[in-house]
Image (cartoon, rainbow, N blue to C red):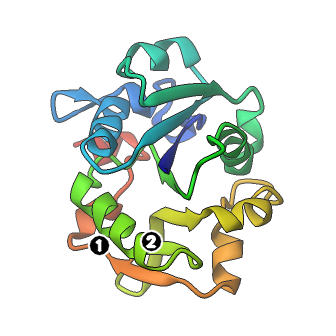
Amino acid sequence: MIVAILLAAGKSSRTGNQNKLLLKYKKTKVITSSIRNILDSKVDKIIVVIGKNKQLIKKHIPKQKKIKIVYNSSYSYGMASSIIKGIEALPINTNHFFITLADMPKIPASHYNKMIRAGTKNNRLPIVTFFNKKQFNPVLFPFSFLNKIKKIKGDKGARLILEKEKKIKITAIKSSYIEDLDTLDDFK
């Protein structure tokens, strides 16, 4: 089973008093666009980790049995706390899991599928998105990395683990895939 842990619990501190996941992107909310792209891929299940504005965010998450919502009450402590919440919700029969960000709605299903194909050919190494020799999200981890990732802290995510590990690099075809929407200017 391939599971996507979609991190949607950030504080949106760079968009003032607005939660960036609730802003419009291509006629829909950012959170909805990100989820639709994953639903269109070969991912079997999506775990959406929410935090700030949880009730408003929930309204824009499609109601499907492929989607499970988990609340991270410690979201203000950084990304690691959300990753760990997502990991704790993984089904027992998970083979691989993505860590991906809800503020990256430009990642198409085809990119997720390309990473899944690489992961099924090699189930021991993480599959990492790269563009211009720089590492980005999403990352597809084999289940064997679970215990390493459970030890992360702060707002760095799993980047420090990936720096020390062998990995398979998947190049993003377009630079737009790796653009996250962080500030109000990013929506213009």
Look at the numbered disc 2 and give the secondary structure of its residue. helix
Q: How many labels does the image show?
A: 2
Above or below for 76 versus 118: above
* Real-space CA distance between mark 1 and mark 2, rounded to the nearest whole angstrom: 16 Å
| Residue 122 visible to an observer of this rendering | yes
Residue bearing the label numbered 2: 119
In x, y percent, where is residue 25? 24, 35
- x 38%, y 25%: residue: 22
Residue at the image position 38 percent from the left and 32 percent from the top: 31
In the foreground, 140 or 21? 140
Could you tell whether 116 is left or right of 16 in the image? left
Mark 1 or mark 2: which is in front? 2
Q: Residue at x 35, y 63 (%)?
A: 178
| Earlier sequence position, callout 1 versus callout 2 | 2
Instruction: Please tell me in which quadrant of the rendered image residue 45 appears.
Output: top left
Q: Position of residue 115 (x, y in %)?
A: 37, 68
Q: In this view, does 56 lie to the left or right of 106?
A: right
Residue 111 position in % (x across, y down): 28, 63
Q: Looking at numbered disc 2 in the image, what kind of residue is underneath it?
A: Gly
Residue 56 x %, y %: 47, 13
Q: In the structure shown, which secondary structural element does the residue marked by tag 1 occupy?
A: loop
Q: Determine which of the numbered discs, if any, sits on residue 172 in the image.
A: 1
**Where 16 sits versus 55, above or below?**
below
Kindly identify the amino acid type of the residue bearing the numbered disc 1. Answer: Ala
Horizontally, residue 28 falls left or right of residue 9, namely: left
